[in-house]
Image: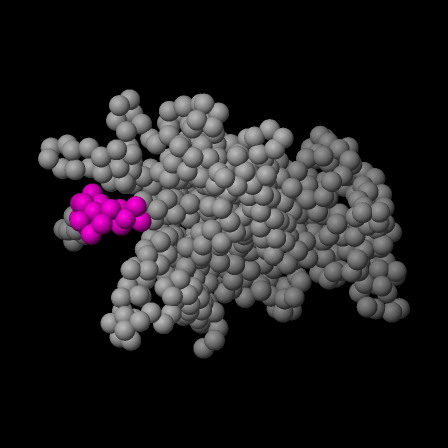
Amino acid sequence: MNTFAKARSKWVGVALIAIALIALPFALASVGTAWVRIANFAILYTFLALGLNIVVGFAGLLDLGYIAFYAVGAYAYALLASPHFGLHLPFWVILPIGGLVACVFGVLLGTPTLKLRGDYLAIVTLGFGEIVRIFLNNLSRPINITNGPQGISRIDPFRFGSFNFSRSETIFGLTFSGPIKYYYILLALLLLAILVNLRLQHSRIGRAWEAIREDEIAARAMGINTTHIKLLAFAMGASFGGIAGGMFAAIQEFISPESFVLVESVMVLSMVVLGGMGNVWGVVLGAVLLSFVPELLRYTVAPVQHALFGRTIIEPEVIRMLLFGLALVLMMLYRPAGLLPSAVRKRELARTNGSAE
Amino acid sequence: MRHLEVAYGGIKAVKGIDLSVPKGELVCLIGTNGAGKTTTLKAIAGMLPVAADAVLYDGAPIGGLRAFQLVRRGLALVPEGRGVFGQLTVAENLAMGAYVRSDAAAVKLDMERVFNLFPRLAERRGQSAGTLSGGEQQMLAIGRALMSRPKLLLLDEPSMGLAPLMVQKIFETIRAVAREGVTILLVEQNARLALEASSRGYVMETGLITLSGPARELLSDSKVRAAYLGETD
């Protein structure tokens, strides 16, 4: 009876969250369409963070150039669906292609770095991220592939026949603006990504990643093919990044190398660390928080200062970085394993506390 | 194994040694620090590259195979320094030992067998391995290796860093495992205990086997007594 009631209340909770997620874009749209866009970007970043979580959280491989895969996916989409080459493939074909291309890049990065760990791996991946960005910036000559720093514009939005995701439409008296339509498809893809992550974590591969993260020699002694398993982490993480990149290109309808700078990699990594490395729900929470809070600040910092002092003393941008730094320091002090730590890291924390007694 | 050579970069750490472990026996390899014992063991376990025909197992050359392939053939290594997964629980560590197996029901039974062999681990099955004492971690490392149902168990310095009483205990369990029919190659610095537990022994010095024979004879050998057992006639 008790367990039955528990299961029922769990389902009620899920249903409530589902209703909230479905209603969210309309609530946001009533404040301003900009907020729907912000929600869409929050979903994109969550998707990215989940991909990076496979590499960093599950397999324990520090990747500082993750945004490169996002770039690869975005450019794959842009080149195959824009007037730049005159190609206009449908999005359901290009998104998987983008994922695949990014996957190849993941293996390209993974193969030479198999023997590296920690700081060394971080430096190589950081370099990789920069190399990809610089290539994108310069591949406009002698043959114009990426259009250099000008980027690629007029990228096709998502389209199903005549159903265009960038246009506004009224169905049953409800106005679905472009961003709202994107919101639903992004949300659906995100749920899929969360499902894949959860399944991976408890799979045989997930356990192998855990073993490698803990002790690579011992993992090999267990019969784990560490080479394959590590490459798999890079490849899967990269695919997530590639697919997210494709969605980004479609939503923005314009991309340039500027969108794929190091700070973006750091941002995604912060989401993973802040939320809780290795815990899928923690990563989701971290990504959502780090996507929304800066925007909230952007809209509140200036008016609050005006109300208090009659003028803007500190720019919102400055306050944002200040608070971000403060938040990270506080996190490291009070919740070093993240807001929602994974079970394993929670145990590790309990251990250090225990030995301090 | 015949004429095994292992080199790190340009330096030969193991300079052509011959050593054989008959089925069902406990054989030990003793020697001082840096003699090449661990290197030998790692080479057998597929952690270091060696020539294909340098290692024979069940009559088949396995020298070129990698660790993950060898575990599936029944070789299990208990690495030096134990290498338990510190943040995983005792039970999760044991489950990881059965990574190559897919027979879940039998794995469960084997876990109970390991818990019978090491009652201390059973008490702590939900505890994370990093919180165990050194001896308990060694038990866990051996138990974990047994979870892959090995035919040949390679033990690297199981007594390292343990209290004397715990060393006695570990050796009792090694004998118990050997009695169950598992072939064991034991690498040890504690020569007396290793030789007392084994049927055959090899003595290694700077990459070469300098002495070998039945363990009993080595125990009474004057050179071994002087160099490794700390006795003078």
> Is residue A186 shown to the viewer in this render?
yes
As drawn, A321 above or below A239:
below
Colour scheme of this structure image?
A: one colour
Q: Is residue A80 magenta?
A: no
Asked whether, in this view, residue A56 is left or right of residue B205, the answer is left
Q: Which residue is painted at 47% across and 75% down in the image? A: A356
Q: Which residue is painted at 73% across and 31% down in the image? A: B61
Closer to us: A49 or B37: A49
Q: Magenta region: which residues?
A: A13-38
Q: Quadrant of the C terminus of chain A?
A: bottom left
Residue furthest bottom in the image: A357
Q: Which residue is painted at 40% across and 62% down in the image? A: A317
Q: Name the dominant secondary structure of the magenta segment.
A: helix
Q: Is residue A34 magenta?
A: yes
Closer to us: A355 or B74: A355
Residue furthest front in the image: A311
Locate residue A212, reporting x and y percent.
55, 48
Locate residue A18, reporting x and y percent.
21, 44
As drawn, A161 above or below B3:
above
Locate residue B173, reporting x and y percent.
59, 56
Closer to us: A18 or B225: A18
Quadrant in the rendering for residue A334: bottom left
Asked whether, in this view, residue A143 is left or right of residue A159, the answer is right
Closer to us: B199 or A84: A84
Q: Which residue is painted at 50% across and 39% down in the image? A: A150
Locate residue A81, reporting x and y percent.
42, 27
Quadrant in the rendering for residue B64: top right
Asked whether, in this view, residue A334 is left or right of residue A296, the answer is right
